[in-house]
Image (cartoon, grey):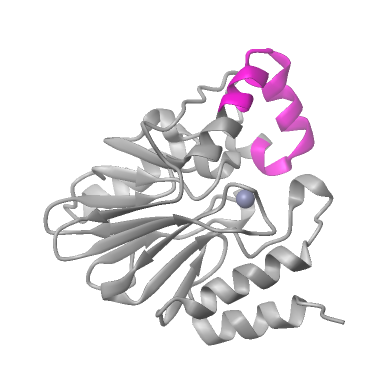
């Protein structure tokens, strides 16, 4: 699978529903490049980097993590360059590291999640690493002719959700932040959803990019989220 060009400066490797791999994005500055999410596994990273190399793109200088869930982070051990995450993401990853010390952990994940079983077929150990840089609220990267504004957001999906706003391209990366919380029986916290919708509304963008679907126009995403938002 090759890279998809979204704008002159934004490319991505598409999400794969059968294995629940999220999309991995690439923001191409004149000086530095930034990847959005590390991916599910070493082989997910390898597929992404092969796609980058076939376009003659250099490997990412930085990789920012949208949240700790394993499909977004367990590839972090194999990335090129420096990883960046919200401080709470590292706390969650530290907890994953602890759990993975038990040899049963990978077996338990395979048991629970058919996608995990497919992604880690034939593999019996995990290498979970923390990010190199953490931020506590927001951080801005000047990639050369293009900026990445990285910030934490309230989200119903996970406590550590991070967004990346690219003002020059009017694009907002949202990770999985608009989804319900799968680790708590798919609970959709309406208050958090409302705050997230206000945040999206306030960002001056045309497109919103979620990790597990095609890029959406901001208005269609807000319309969809509005249909999930129950007010009384
Ligand atoms: Zn997630």
Main SS of the magenta segment?
A: helix
* Nearer to me, 111 or 172: 172
Q: Residue at x 50, y 22 (%)?
A: 127
Figure quadrant of the C terminus = bottom right
Q: Position of residue 231 (x, y in %)?
A: 82, 80
User: Is residue 98 part of the magenta span, yes or no?
Assistant: yes
Figure quadrant of the N terminus = bottom left
Q: From this viewpoint, is residue 81 visible?
A: yes
Q: Position of residue 102 (x, y in %)?
A: 69, 13
Q: Is residue 130 above or below residue 13?
A: above
**Quadrant in the picture for residue 108:** top right
Q: Which residues are magenta?
A: 94-116
Q: Position of residue 120 (x, y in %)?
A: 59, 31
Q: Is residue 9 above or below residue 37?
A: below
* Residue 28 as seen in the image, left or right of residue 74: left
* Nearer to me, 58 or 179: 179
User: Is residue 119 part of the magenta span, yes or no?
Assistant: no
Q: Residue at x 73, y 59 (%)?
A: 180
Q: Residue at x 31, y 72 (%)?
A: 167
* Residue 187 as seen in the image, left or right of residue 102: right
Q: Position of residue 115 (x, y in %)?
A: 67, 43
Q: Is residue 89 above or below residue 226?
A: above
Q: From this viewpoint, is residue 1 visible?
A: no
**Quadrant in the picture for residue 147:** bottom left
* Nearer to me, 76 or 140: 140
* Residue 81 as seen in the image, left or right of residue 114: left
**Total number of numbered labels?**
0
């Amino acid at each position: 699978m090759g890279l998809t060009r979204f704008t002159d400066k934004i490319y991505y490797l598409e999400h794969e529903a059968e294995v629940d791999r999220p999309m991995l994005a690439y923001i191409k500055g004149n000086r530095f490049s930034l990847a959005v999410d590390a991916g599910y596994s070493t082989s997910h990273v390898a597929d992404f980097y092969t796609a980058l190399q076939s376009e003659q793109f250099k490997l990412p200088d930085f990789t920012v993590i949208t949240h700790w869930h394993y499909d977004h982070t367990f590839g972090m051990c194999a990335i090129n360059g420096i990883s960046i995450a919200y401080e709470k993401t590292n706390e969650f990853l530290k907890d994953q590291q602890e759990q993975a010390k038990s040899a049963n952990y990978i077996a338990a994940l395979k048991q629970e999640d058919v996608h995990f079983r497919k992604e880690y077929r034939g593999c019996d150990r995990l290498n979970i690493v923390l990010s190199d840089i953490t931020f506590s609220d927001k951080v801005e990267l000047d990639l050369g002719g293009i900026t990445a504004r990285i910030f934490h957001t309230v989200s119903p999906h996970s406590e550590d959700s991070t967004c990346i706003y690219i003002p020059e391209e009017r694009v907002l990366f949202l990770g999985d932040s608009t989804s319900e919380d799968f680790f708590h029986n798919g609970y959709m916290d309406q208050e958090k959803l409302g705050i997230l919708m206000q945040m999206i509304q306030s960002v001056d963008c045309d497109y919103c990019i979620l990790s597990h679907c095609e890029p959406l126009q901001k208005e269609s995403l807000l319309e969809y989220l509005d249909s999930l938002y129950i007010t009384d």
